[in-house]
Image (tube, rainbow, N blue to C red):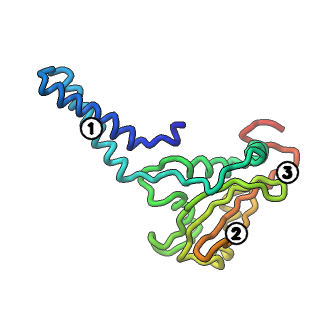
Amino acid sequence: MLRQTSLAQLGLVIGGLLTIVGFAAYFADYATLNLAGFFYGIPLLLGGLALKAAELKPTPYSQSTAPEVITLREKQATPTQNQIRQDVTRYRYGQASHLIETIERLELGNFDEEYPELQGIREIEIAGAYGLVLEFDSPFVPLKAWQEKQERITKFFGPDIRIDLAQPSEDQIDLSLISELPQGLNSPETGEN
């Protein structure tokens, strides 16, 4: 739940309320409440404004996840798949785009404005395996450039993951991270065998 809470919004609301209380206390001649309102309210309000300027909203799911896929995720998802899913579906601060550091390391783009941008995610079942699909808006990096880096992408995302690339529309690239855990083993996060 905390991952889905905007710290910027929280700072703005609490800081705004404390600042209003501080001003009201100043005019009502309540010195202690006045100081508390000003010393805590204004810094929280300014901090909330600063966070709001640097806020990156969570990546939305492009389709709801079926209960069967959630069960499959619990059994087969690798730590990398879980980490990516959790990271991109929470508020981030001080980044231009989700997974921008990953895209830079994979050398998929030339300049800041020409990097593919994560637009959505979805969880699917692919031939009995759990798959996490990252949907990128990629007008400057064609499918061919992604395909040339497919082996590097596979190594980057680690063991027990297969990479599939697709181009559902002209400027969109779907990067599927498909679990390849040996049959009968569960995800290391569950601790079951």
Which residue is at the front of the view, 53 or 154?
A: 53
**Residue at horizontal 53%, vertical 65%?**
117
**Residue at horizontal 56%, vertical 49%?**
89
**Residue at horizontal 12%, vertical 27%?**
27
Which residue is at the front of the view, 146 or 26?
A: 26
Q: Name the image quarter holding residue 116.
A: bottom right
Mark earlier in primary sequence (1, 2):
1
- Graded by Cα atoms within 10 Å as few (under 14), some (14 to 19) or many (20 or more), the crowding at tag 1 reads some
Compared to residue 140, the image places residue 80 above or below, namely above
User: Closer to the camera: disc 3 or disc 2?
Assistant: 2
Is residue 21 toward the left or the right of residue 133 in the image?
left
x and y percentages locating residue 165 in the rendered image: 70, 69
State yes or no: discs 1 and 2 in contact (Cβ < 8 Å): no
Q: Which residue is mark 1?
A: 43
**Element type at mark 1:** helix
Q: Which residue is mark 3?
A: 182
User: Closer to the camera: disc 1 or disc 3?
Assistant: 1
Q: Which residue is mark 2?
A: 165
Q: Amino acid at mark 3?
A: Pro
Residue 187 visible to an observer of this rendering: no
Compared to residue 115, the image places residue 177 above or below, namely above
Mark earlier in primary sequence (3, 2):
2
Is residue 150 toward the left or the right of residue 5 in the image?
right
**Element type at mark 3:** loop
> Where is the N terminus found, in terms of image quarters?
top right
Q: Amino acid at mark 2?
A: Leu
